[in-house]
Amino acid sequence: MNVLDPRNNHGVAYVDDAYMPVHEARMPLLDRGFVRSDATYDVAHVWKGSFFRLDDHIDRFFSSMHALRMALPHSHEEIAAILIECVRLSGLRDAYVQMTCTRGVPPPSSRDPRDCSNRFYAFATPFVWIANDTQRRDGLPMVLSSVTRIPPESVDPRIKNFHWLDLTMGIFEAYDRQAIVALLHDGHGNVTEGAGFNVFVVKNGVLSSPARGVFEGMTRRTVSELCVLLELPCEFRLVRVLEMLDADEIFLTSTAGGIMPVCLLDGRPVGTGMPGPITALLMSEYWARQEQGWLGTPVTNYPINANGNGACTS
Amino acid sequence: MNVLDPRNNHGVAYVDDAYMPVHEARMPLLDRGFVRSDATYDVAHVWKGSFFRLDDHIDRFFSSMHALRMALPHSHEEIAAILIECVRLSGLRDAYVQMTCTRGVPPPSSRDPRDCSNRFYAFATPFVWIANDTQRRDGLPMVLSSVTRIPPESVDPRIKNFHWLDLTMGIFEAYDRQAIVALLHDGHGNVTEGAGFNVFVVKNGVLSSPARGVFEGMTRRTVSELCVLLELPCEFRLVRVLEMLDADEIFLTSTAGGIMPVCLLDGRPVGTGMPGPITALLMSEYWARQEQGWLGTPVTNYPINANGNGACTS
């Protein structure tokens, strides 16, 4: 492929041992990854030309595949090299990078998932923000959704999966109620997560985030590690829906946007109605440390003159 | 496409306004139908050259799309014509025919499902049997799975969807325990459904099938209608797991195979251990009435000499 074609700035995919512009990437219609959502994935991000926690994401991807009884012919190192190459070819300095393993296409008339050869797909696209610039500065409006998150007894949320219809209906509900994001409950009075994010609540200087029924996100893990470094008390535990209503601060964490303050909950101000000091401190540390190379894997040898979304420094 | 190419006997797909051999059919990697399982579908079948309940399947497909806030530019009649054409081009006399609507591909960096143009995919492949000839004659071994079915509070099972990881883990559990199929429970002591099938239990001449937390399958509906015609008492209600253990007969219903007896449950014989008389009567009526044209839509104008899986009678 022509790495300098500006159309590639929409992203680059890797399918069937070839790199291609992401808008040209296709998968078989009969892949059980589509027709049975029989797949797992992980998403890493690249910021200013460097992956953040790339090895941690790939380790988790392997754990997820193992839990679903999937395996690929690629090693950890080979997957890292493919992901880096997707980013390099795209020229993107800030990128959203997805690796996916599907069950694959069964032989004609077979319903046995053991008959499939598992398939690998990867792509890098421009960095995705759940919250735009204004929302990251002033906070997001969020609703407590009426939808119950798929429970861990049905689908283990720690295995990153595409079972998102509950989350997608939450997105519609948020828009219907003049908000941007929706937080789902567990059917027992506890909060869980939303579409692509974990939630933290701050009360009297203590941070808490749901321990169960949620994806154990990498940004969630990063916040808990920052809390150790910054000597902030932070715990994973059951978080009651009612605790949200008198929180001092609420923020969301996601690879798609980092740490994002919530300013309104069901139309009521959270705390002062503006991002609080602990949220602001964590946001600042999260980005500053990445820019200093913390847990980073630089992408090298970007094509000269590649028209990415950051300065061309390679 | 060359309708007489024998490779098309694996099936024919319709994607982006074109017909093609199903093994060549592809979808965009970034379709939310894949990367968020944001899709609905329906499956009809063709038996001896005639669709069964085609209009009922398409009606339900439209209801599912409406519930997920999706819409296609195709009318009911246009979708019927596309499905019939897939079958005709395949030459298949016995076929499994799927229609799917996905949310579509969002614009670059958008996370808003409202920004997507919904997409339509269809295909016809050879008829799929959950149970093979021997299993339909002698009965299937089934396990009561340890997995809880995704509850209706999270994802409405009446909207046919690809959220199958619970069902897929059930399939693995069945194989691990020397069975073929797994029946999932609802977490409250009631049975629900399995991978692509509903369940009926027969006790003292009365048929029962779960009323809630299940897909309301077309074969399930057909059985209830046959029961009216045959003056057999049949009810949809909560069915306790414990009722399964002293059932006289158990059978499964699915478009992928019709009515299928269960002979073993967790290794214990069901009733006599052989298919019972009510199951046998319903199986017989189900196929005989279809072959007489009941609720049928014939596929006409099959290509002459098409090498389908039935007699070439067109």
Image (cartoon, coloured by chain):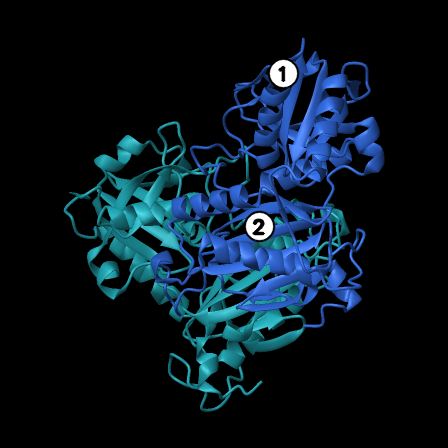
Chain colours: A blue, B cyan
Most extreme residue toward the top, as rendered? A204
Q: Residue at x 79, y 56 (%)?
A: A312
User: In which image quadrant can residue A282 be found?
Assistant: top right
Q: Secondary structure at mark 2?
A: loop
A82 relative position to A175: left or right: left
Chain of residue at mark 1: A
Chain of residue at mark 2: B
A126 relative position to B15: left or right: right
- At which x and y percent is residue A178? 80, 32
Q: Of the residues tagged 1 and 2, which is closer to the observer?
A: 1
User: Foreground residue, B107 or A209?
Assistant: A209
Q: Residue at x 37, y 40 (%)?
A: B184
User: Foreground residue, B21 or A62?
Assistant: A62
- At which x and y percent is residue B207? 32, 42
Q: Residue at x 76, y 23 (%)?
A: A280
Q: Secondary structure at mark 1?
A: loop
Circle 2 Cα neighbour tier, 10 Å, few/some/many (<14 / 14–19 / ≥20):
many
Q: Determine which residue is flagged by label 1.
A: A232
Circle 1 Cα neighbour tier, 10 Å, few/some/many (<14 / 14–19 / ≥20):
some
Q: Determine which residue is flagged by label 2.
A: B37
B280 relative position to A125: left or right: left
Q: Type of residue at label 1?
A: Leu
User: Foreground residue, A14 or A105?
Assistant: A14
Up the image or down, B264 lies above or below A184; here it is below
- At which x and y percent is residue B165? 45, 46
Most extreme residue toward the left, as rendered? B272
Quarter occupied by the N terminus of chain B = bottom right
Q: Type of residue at label 2?
A: Ser
